[in-house]
């Protein structure tokens, strides 16, 4: 068999695998839309659950999920970006940087339930935050921090070195060069870490199980020390241990569909920001 035939077979296999992935994705989405679309209504999206979560809506869980996403990003995104700036722009390639990267890679491979137990031990018990939005946000922030650091490092490395030398040659300081030149050029790729982090935080159940999530709390939070309902945990509860599994099953499908829709909307927003700032970088 010559090289051309081998190449054609390889490309055919790759296409089939790609089509299989796409088909699986659309099959899952179609399944959720088919079973959950009939439940979606204005009342379902704007009211609290009732009757042991077999009736009513999921509004408190939606608000709780958004609070946790925003809170975790406020913590992890600035810290992750600053850590990546230090390791890429200041620390060089010494043993300290290698140690930090090894630890970052190790953190990214730790199961999420371990982060949940750590968050319960540190934030809930030791620091006295209790089961709260603050404790849950910090735990989720730690969970996605390695992802933000690694994607930001790669984004900073992708900025041509001539940008830095040109800025320094014009008299700018290193900090001014990073803030005015490097970060704007790298931000479109940095936002990739933000997109991936939002997607992971939105769907995590184990970390919030120990730090913030409430089984049944049909009210909105009033502060960062309040406990909240969240869509992933709400979905887990009504699908596995509700008071009436058959009656709550349509609500479970509807909750899953809303959760996916929120993740998609956040990803679209982040992608829009990426394209917007990428266009600004090209025009400048």
Image: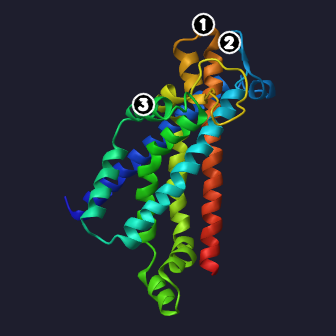
Q: Quadrant of the C terminus?
A: bottom right
Characterize the local packing of mark 3: few (<14), some (14-19) or many (20 or more) Cα atoms within 10 angstroms.
Answer: some
| Kind of element beneath mark 2 | loop
Characterize the local packing of mark 2: few (<14), some (14-19) or many (20 or more) Cα atoms within 10 angstroms.
Answer: many
Task: Tell me where residue 180 appears, x and y as whole percent.
Answer: 57, 77
State the residue at coordinates (48%, 88%).
168
**Location of mark 2 (residue):** 54
Which of marks 3 and 1 precedes in the sequence? 3
Q: Residue furthest top?
A: 244
| Residue 40 figure quarter | top right
State the residue at coordinates (64%, 37%).
224
Tally the numbered discs: 3
**Is 253 situated above or below 90?**
above
**Location of mark 3 (residue):** 121
Tags 1 and 3 touching, CB below 8 Å: no
Which of marks 3 and 2 precedes in the sequence? 2
**Location of mark 1 (residue):** 243
Q: Residue furthest front?
A: 127
State the residue at coordinates (51%, 62%).
190
How far is the residue under mark 1 from the one under mark 3? 30 Å
Labelled disc at residue 3:
none
**Is 148 situated above or below 223?**
below
State the residue at coordinates (35%, 70%).
91
């Amino acid at each position: 068999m010559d090289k051309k035939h081998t190449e054609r077979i390889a490309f055919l296999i790759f296409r089939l695998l790609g089509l299989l992935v796409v088909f699986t994705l659309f099959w899952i989405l179609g399944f959720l839309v088919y079973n959950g679309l009939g439940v979606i209504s204005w009342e379902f999206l704007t009211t609290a659950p009732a009757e042991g979560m077999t009736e009513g809506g999921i509004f408190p869980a939606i608000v709780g999920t958004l609070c946790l996403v925003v809170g975790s990003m406020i913590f992890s995104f600035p810290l992750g970006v600053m850590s990546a700036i230090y390791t890429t722009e200041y620390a060089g390639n010494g043993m300290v940087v290698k140690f930090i990267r090894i630890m970052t890679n190790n953190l990214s491979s730790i199961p999420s339930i371990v982060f949940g137990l750590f968050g319960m031990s540190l934030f809930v018990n030791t620091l006295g935050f209790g089961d709260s939005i603050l404790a849950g946000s910090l735990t989720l922030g730690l969970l996605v921090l390695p992802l933000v650091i690694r994607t930001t490092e790669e984004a900073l490395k992708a900025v041509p070195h001539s940008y830095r030398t040109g800025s320094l040659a014009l008299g700018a300081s290193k900090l001014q060069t990073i803030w005015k030149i490097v970060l704007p050029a790298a931000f479109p790729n940095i936002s990739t870490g933000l997109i991936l982090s939002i997607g992971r935080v939105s769907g995590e159940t184990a970390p919030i199980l120990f730090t913030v999530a409430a089984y049944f709390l049909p009210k909105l939070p009033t502060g960062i020390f309040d406990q909240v309902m969240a869509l992933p945990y709400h979905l887990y509860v009504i699908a596995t241990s509700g008071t009436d599994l058959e009656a709550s099953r349509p609500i479970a499908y509807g909750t899953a569909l809303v959760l996916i829709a929120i993740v998609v909307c956040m990803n679209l927003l982040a992608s829009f920001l990426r394209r917007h700032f990428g266009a600004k970088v090209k025009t400048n």
